[in-house]
Structure formats: C-alpha cells, structure tokens
Image (tube, grey):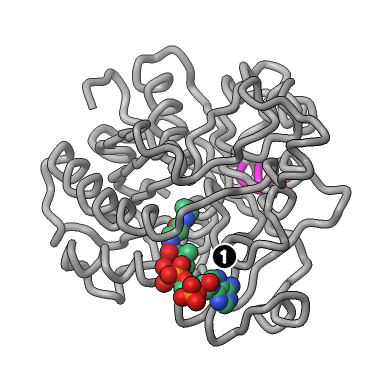
Amino acid sequence: MNSIYSVGITGMGSYVPEKIVSNDDLSKIMDTSDEWINTRTGIRERRIADKDIATSDLCTEAALKAIKDANIDSKDIDLILIATVTSDMAFPSTACIVQKNIGADNAAAFDISVGCSGFLYGLAIGSNFIATGAYKTVLVIGSEVLSKILDWEDRSTCVLFGDGAGACVLQRCEDGKGILSYDLGADGANGHFLTQPAGGSRMPASHETVEKRLHYVHMDGGEVFKFAVRAMEKASLKALEKANIGLEDIDYLIPHQANIRIIKSSAKRLKVPKEKVYVNLDKYGNMSSASIPIALDEAYHKGLIKKDDTVLLVAFGAGLTWASVVLKWVK
Ligand code: UT7
C-alpha cells in the first residue's frame, strides 16, 4: 500500500447466538437430510438468533470483545464500519446503532453492503483512513442475521446459512507489518445470481411481494459456485502479487466459509496444504460477512495464528464481489 502508516489488527472478538440447529433438526421440518447437506456443503449445524435479536445486537457483543482485546476505550474509536446485508432496518445504519450501544461517541459510522466479501472491503476501507493519518482507531465488523431473510420453505438456500458477528480493531502498527495488500473487485453484470429482490426502491414491500416470497434470499447456487472458485484464486494471486510474496510464504489461509467443496478446490488451485486452511463452516454454516472475522478470531484465539505469521484472507459474495487481504499478524 502507498501509505504513511502501516495498519494492523490490534484486537479481535466474535459472537454467535446460543441456539444450535443441526442438519437433523432441519430434516424434521423439511425434505432434506444430514447426508445431503454434509456431503454437498460440509455444514453440520448453524447458529440461529432468537426472534427479538437483530444484527446490531450481535455486532455489539463482538465489538465489546474486540475493544477489550485491543485494550482500548470505546471513546478512542474514530470510525465504525459494519459490513452486513441484514441491517437492522434500511436506515439509520447498523453502524450508528452500534455506535450508541458501545458508547463510541467520537466515531463516525456507516455500513457497507458487499455481501460475503464485506468484512474484507471493510478492512481495506478502514486501513486507508489510518494509513493516510486521518484516523487512529477503526472498528470493523462483519455481522449477519441471515435467518431472518431466508425462505424456510426453500431447502436449496435455507440449509446453507447461519447467524453471527466478528469484529476487529485496526490501528497503526510497526512499519512493514499488518495489512500488506488487498484486492477488491466486482462483477455487477452477474449480480442477479444472488439477490434479495424486494424491499428496496425497485420493488417496495407490498402484499404482492410478500405473497411471492420476494423478501428472501434468491440464489442460483451452481452459478455462484463456479464464480466462487475462479474469483477466490484470482483475488488471492493478485493480493499476493501486490504484497510481493509467494504462496509458499502463507502461514494461514482463511477463506470465506460457504461450502467445503469451494474451499478445497480453491486451496488445491492455490496449492495451499489443508493443514494451513482454517475451516469452521461445519459448526456455523455460511454467515456471509461474519464468516471470515469469526474464523480469524477463532484461529487467533486458539493460538494457530501467531505474531509475524502471514495470513491470506479471501472471499466472494453477492454483487457479485470478491476481496482478498494479505496481512502480517501483529499481536
Ligand atoms: O456466500 C455466497 C453464497 N452462496 C454460495 O456459496 C453457494 C455456492 N453453491 C453451492 O454451494 C452449491 O451449488 C449448493 C450447495 C447450493 C448446491 O449444491 P449442488 O451440488 O450444486 O446441488 P444442486 O443445486 O445441483 O441440487 C442437486 C439436487 C436437486 O435435485 P434434482 O433436481 O437433481 O432432483 C435439488 O433439488 O439436490 C436437491 N436439493 C436438496 N436435496 C436435499 C437441493 N437442496 C437440497 C436439500 N436437501 N437441502
């Protein structure tokens, strides 16, 4: 990055709802099976938020943990960025709600809508504010309550997703460490493969949109699958090239957790051995923008990622979008 300051992750935290829903639980309410879900996706169970819980509630829990881990005060935060496609409401932004919840009175706040690539877009945006010297402390959160926008009568989508939140604190770090590079991209021409069609200005909520089930996730899984495998490889190689390092220098690969077959195929194309790939989608399913920060938080708190390790984060998602980040761990 062309920057004045290097920027690293100085605190991490995550939160998932307590309620576990297994594949067997789902097979009792719809025509599916543990065998189908597990062999096609690698998912065994997912967390589902209670009825009265919204995305900002999960964000708040994860944010408080990240703030503690970074050993800062909420008042030190200059900017809150929340990546989500399940904001509490159309406006105000979820970031403004979280700003109030955590008492970050000095922070600017806004949401970013980039689907599952959102947390990595957030790292890129947030780090630039610090790299230029404009801000010192940025809180980046990826959080979703996807269970509220899933069509529980569509077995081809509802079994895939789960709820959760992951947060990190970005601050200046030692020169040459922290975020070394990123690659962001979009293919808007193919955005129709993954949408929530109604509820916006194109198709405002009406009796008809509700009856036609247009407020739920609509996805062409096969098309998204093909895009994912190509995008993950391309984005990874681009970020590595920008950081001027090779795949052999990677200590850990944390890919978006959508489908074990996508993860395995991407790791194989990149020739990253499976011991270096972090996988937790068996426990949580696809949590969209929350998947990568939760996986990163787990890998770090389990001691798998250590100071000075080089980590590659890579995602694809609605938009369609992709994103990758290479970082040298600073904690
Ligand atoms: O974060 C980005 C979000 N999206 C993704 O990452 C999705 C990427 N795509 C995928 O992960 C895969 O395409 C899926 C897991 C969604 C689907 O796997 P697939 O191997 O492409 O299966 P398919 O769509 O070809 O479906 C095969 C069959 C169909 O039956 P027929 O038409 O062959 O008789 C489906 O009706 O499996 C059936 N099916 C199910 N059966 C049992 C679809 N969903 C289910 C289900 N349980 N839950």
Residue at (39%, 53%) from the top-left corner? 224
Label 1 CB, ligand 1: below 8 Å?
yes
Magenta-tinted stretch: 61-66
The 10 Å Cα crowd at callout 1, few under 14, some 14 to 19, many 20 or more, is some
Residue 189, image x, y percentages: 34, 32
Q: Main secondary structure of the magenta part?
A: helix
Query: Looking at the picture, how far across and down is residue 159, in whole percent?
Result: 61, 67
- Would you say 257 lies left or right of 6 here? right
Which residue is at the front of the view, 323 or 220? 220
Residue position marked by numbered label 1 in the rendering: 156
Say which quadrant the N terminus sits in. top left
- Residue that extends furthest to the top in the rendered view of this protein: 134
Secondary structure under tag 1 reads helix
Q: Quadrant of residue 197?
A: top right
48 shown above or below 328: below
Q: Amino acid at mark 1?
A: Ser
The residue positioned 77% from the left and 57% from the top of the image is 49
Of the pair 208 and 200, the residue shown nearer to us: 208
Residue 8 percent coordinates (x, y):
39, 38
200 to the left or right of 318: right
